[in-house]
Amino acid sequence: MQARLRDHAFRAGCAVWVVLAVAFWVQVFRGGDDLLDPAALEVPENPLNLDVEVADDLRVSGAAFGVRVDFGGGGGVPLFLETKHVPLAPGQDFGWIVWVDTDRQQVRWREVFTSASPDNWQVADDGSYALSEDGATMTREVTADVVEGRIQHFWSVAEGDLPGPHRIQLFVEDVPVADFAFEVSELEP
């Protein structure tokens, strides 16, 4: 009798974990609204401690790469989930956050993005993007506002993107500060 109760409790516990895992991945694959406002993103404390002196008045103290997950059904504040695995789901946001110690209002950053889907680049023609001759690498240079001691940039998985390895090399004021290697992949059934 006690063994049967233990088996039922174990199965019930497993069922709860499965439901929680499915709910999490449904939200991840559903994607989220385009919430690029840095103040509207709940982020962890500086997860990767760095100490890169970019200039006398600018220091990079941390960097993280991950995905945005909205558990609020589109109405909540999205969470930043640090990971090296991005679900291959159109609309899934992924990108980086960099913590800066500065009194500057703005800083210049450049990212060099190497994609497994070079034939599928979809970017706004605002003059900040440059495509390599072979089409495999996109470089973007932007002067961005520093908000709450952070700068950040997010991309979205697009329809037609391919699974595979990706890489973003990040520079702040031409100083290398982070090198994010990550995998875009489908969830296994």
Image (cartoon, helix red, strand yellow):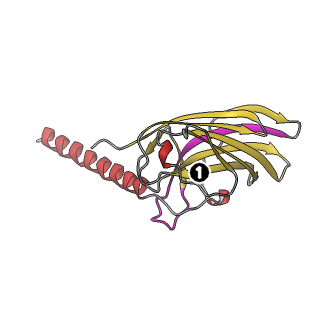
Identify the residue shown where x is 71% and y is 48%.
150
Identify the residue shown where x is 65% and y is 39%.
63
Q: Amino acid at mark 1?
A: Phe
- Compared across the picture, whether 75 is left or right of 187 comes to right
- Compared across the picture, whether 158 is left or right of 63 comes to left
- Looking at the rendering, in which quadrant would you find the C terminus? top left
x then y, percent, for residue 130: 65, 45
Task: Report the front residue among 21 and 55.
Answer: 55
Q: Residue furthest left?
A: 1
x then y, percent, for residue 111: 66, 41
Image height of 145 relative to 102, above or below: below
Task: Report the front residue among 153 and 124.
Answer: 124
Q: Residue furthest front?
A: 133
Identify the residue shown where x is 36% and y is 44%.
186
x then y, percent, for residue 62: 69, 38
Q: Quadrant of residue 185?
A: top left
- Compared across the picture, whether 119 is left or right of 172 comes to left
Report how many numbered discs are placed on residues in the image.
1
- Looking at the rendering, in which quadrant would you find the N terminus? top left
Residue 107 lies within the magenta run: no
Residue 64 lies within the magenta run: yes
Identify the residue shown where x is 86% and y is 48%.
103
Which region of the structure is painted magenta?
58-78
Packing grade of label 1 (10 A; few <14, some 14-19, many >=20) is some
x then y, percent, for residue 183: 46, 37
State the residue position of label 1: 154
Q: Quadrant of residue 50?
A: top right
Q: Secondary structure at mark 1?
A: strand
Q: Residue furthest bottom?
A: 75
